[in-house]
Image (spheres, rainbow, N blue to C red):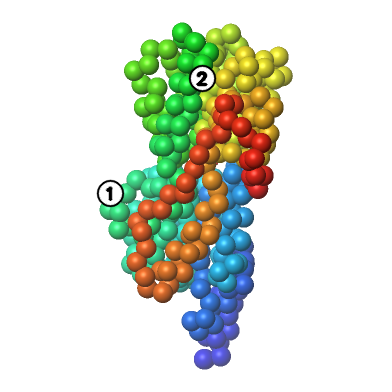
Amino acid sequence: MKRNRWICGVLWLALCALALGGCQGAERTGKSAVVVGFSQLGSESGWRIGNTASMEQAAKAHGFGLMLENANQKQEKQIAAIRSFISYRVDVIAFSPIVETGWTNVLNEARDAGIPVILTDRMIDAEDDDLYTAYIGADFLAEGLRAGEYLIRKADDMGAEHLNIVEITGTEDSTPMRDRQVGFLQAIAGDGRFTILESISGDFLRSKGEECMRYLLEKYGAEGIDVVYSHNVAMTLGALDVLEAAGVRPGQDIILISVDGEQAAVDALREGRINCIVECTPDLGETVMTMVEALVKGEEIPKEIQPEETVFTEFDDLTGLAPRGY
Ligand code: AHR
């Protein structure tokens, strides 16, 4: 009887590890190994791939097992992954919420199981902020403000009287989409030189960035658009392809403002094909794992940690800028 139970237990753990795509280096033998369950929301951009790599490298450096589950842009898959982490009784759950709402039940389950939850990269809309232990990610509102501040400087520099803007936003109901939009609007509010013609969602995907740009070009014509504000580099690169194929010179005929800072975008900025990139760093792994370490030692950690970020523009000398690594 005991032997059967032991075999069942071993099989269950093996299945769990397989279903979760492998628990790298983590064996739950006694209390020795710390295991972190990480639900990544997808692999929609170079930024996201860099973010996953940062989590993997940091977990390895700290000697933690990492149960990594990629949700391929589906909230229900993230919820299922978090439930698996709870069943496995990981030490800490980290996850990047694809959208802000719909997490209350699963986070209550994690709380009832006594497992701390770190939100990485994106926030949730929670009435009860005891549902998570900490948020580690960017200040997206500040990113939007930086984009708007650049545009004001650019308009001053050009002596522009009026500029028509189109906005290609990220995933609806996600924190970066909402706050990058609000911050940008706040920065340009009250300045009569700017009109936002339209905001449409490109879901942070290059293919949708292309689709959005094609639609906007058809609707307003290249002469009707002065500025494209795109919420991430993947969509910006898609938009760039469409503009160039249509004979438009992005960076000159149309001002291009983007967020993220992948190497491809910095290269395009240096070539004069993008005017401004607001930095958003994907390198959150080390901070997350340092906080995991503190939590497993029973220490208190800050409720919110935001990395320092900057902005790269056509007005800056970028010769000393180190390779971005993503
Ligand atoms: O949440 C951060 C955003 O998500 C990044 O700007 C974008 O590239 C990613 O898809």
Q: Residues within 10 Å of mark 2 (few under 14, many from 20)?
A: some
Image x and y of residue 313, in percent: 56, 29
Q: Which marked residue is nearer to the observer: mark 2 or mark 1?
A: 2
SS assignment at label 1: loop
Q: On the rendered structure, is 233 left or right of 105? A: right
Q: Amino acid at mark 2?
A: Lys
User: Height in image: 24 above or below 255?
Assistant: below
Q: Residues within 10 Å of mark 1 (few under 14, many from 20)?
A: few
Indicate which disc, 2 or 1, sits on the residue closer to the N terminus.
1
**Which residue is painted at 59% across and 44% down in the image?**
47
Q: On the rendered structure, is 109 left or right of 1? A: left
Say whether marks 2 and 1 touch (CB < 8 Å).
no
Q: Which mark is residue 191?
A: none
Mark 2 and mark 1: Cα distance apart in space: 40 Å
Q: On the rendered structure, is 100 left or right of 160? A: left
For residue 19, say whether it is visible: no
SS assignment at label 2: helix
> Which of these two is toward me, 245 or 146?
146
Quarter of the rendering containing residue 276: top right
Label 2 C-beta lies within 8 Å of the nearest ligand 1 atom? no
For residue 275, say whether it is visible: yes
**Which residue is painted at 41% across and 69% down in the image?**
295
**Which residue is painted at 41% across and 61% down in the image?**
117
Q: Residue furthest left?
A: 127
Quarter of the rendering containing residue 46: top right
Q: Amino acid at mark 1?
A: Glu
Q: Please give the residue where the numbered disc 1 appears in the rendered image.
A: 127
> Which of these two is toward me, 110 or 56?
56
Image x and y of residue 156, in percent: 47, 16
Q: Please give the residue where the numbered disc 2 appears in the rendered image.
A: 154
Image x and y of residue 198, in percent: 47, 19
Quarter of the rendering containing residue 4: bottom right
